[in-house]
Image: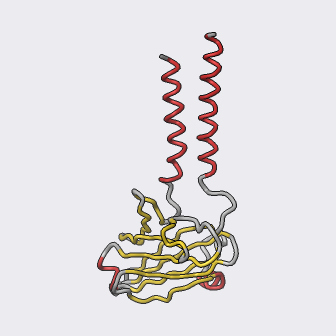
């Protein structure tokens, strides 16, 4: 009976390790039930990124490979269609850069304008791996000014969830060793 309880506890710990990375937020970007949302002020945008050569393979966080990448934002609220929205991709310098430093590190930019269809799209060809930050700025006629930042990596050497997978593998290995050890003591 005690072995079953310990086994159940280890299995739950392994499950928690596997799912912990999926619930984590990256800046203003969050995953919610297989939908990627970007929180901008009080509103949200639906986000997806993909390569034009494999549009079915969408991503929410890191860009898996070098090459052409399309970033798409769809407004969830109608009010945002009338506001001016800009999107930029900048090299991640590790701090909140000044406007001048931000512009100097910008590698792709969609100038501020209103999007009556509710969709903002920007395509960029990434030629080198590294850490970047996406910045969406929304300005409204009533003086609203909202900014959302989300860090991401291009062609990361290791997936960000790798530590969770390693912890889960260690939990499973510990469980197997425990079960085998308890069986050998009985025999």
- Residue 26 in picture, x, y percent from top left: 53, 62
Q: In which quarter of the image is residue 69?
A: bottom right
Decide if residue 81 is on the left or right side of residue 180: left
Looking at the image, which residue sits at the far left? 78
Query: Would you place residue 91 above or below residue 1 in this image?
Result: below
Its colouring scheme is secondary structure
Q: Position of residue 174 (x, y in %)?
A: 63, 30
Residue 100 placement, left or right of 79: right
Q: Position of residue 3 (x, y in %)?
A: 53, 20
On the image, the x and y values in percent for residue 182 come to 61, 17
How many numbered discs? 0
Residue at the location (66% across, 63% down)? 156
Answer with left or right where residue 10 lies relative to residue 83: right
* Rendered residue at 61%/16% (across/down): 183
Q: Residue at x 49, y 28 (%)?
A: 8
Please indicate whether residue 185 sits to the left or right of residue 135 in the image: right
Q: Residue at x 50, y 55 (%)?
A: 24
- Nearer the observer, 4 or 143: 4
Quadrant where the C terminus is found in the figure: top right
Front residue of 104/120: it is 120
Query: Which residue occupies the extreme top position in the image?
Result: 187
């Amino acid at each position: 009976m005690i072995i079953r309880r310990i086994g159940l506890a280890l299995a739950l710990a392994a499950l928690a390790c596997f799912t912990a990375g999926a619930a984590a937020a990256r800046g203003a970007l969050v995953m919610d039930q297989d939908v990627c949302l970007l929180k901008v002020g009080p509103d949200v945008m639906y986000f997806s990124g993909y390569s034009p050569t494999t549009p079915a393979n969408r991503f929410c966080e890191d860009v898996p490979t070098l090459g052409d990448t399309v970033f798409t934002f769809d407004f969830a609220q109608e009010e945002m269609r009338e506001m001016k929205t800009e999107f930029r991709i900048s090299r991640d310098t590790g701090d909140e850069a000044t406007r001048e430093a931000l512009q100097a590190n910008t590698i792709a930019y969609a100038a501020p304008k209103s999007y009556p269809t509710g969709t903002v799209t920007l395509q960029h060809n990434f030629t080198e791996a590294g850490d970047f930050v996406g910045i969406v700025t929304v300005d409204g006629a009533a003086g609203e000014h909202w900014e959302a930042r989300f860090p991401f990596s291009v062609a990361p050497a290791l997936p960000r969830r790798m530590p969770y997978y390693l912890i889960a593998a260690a939990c499973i290995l510990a469980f197997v060793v425990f079960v085998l050890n308890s069986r050998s003591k009985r025999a």
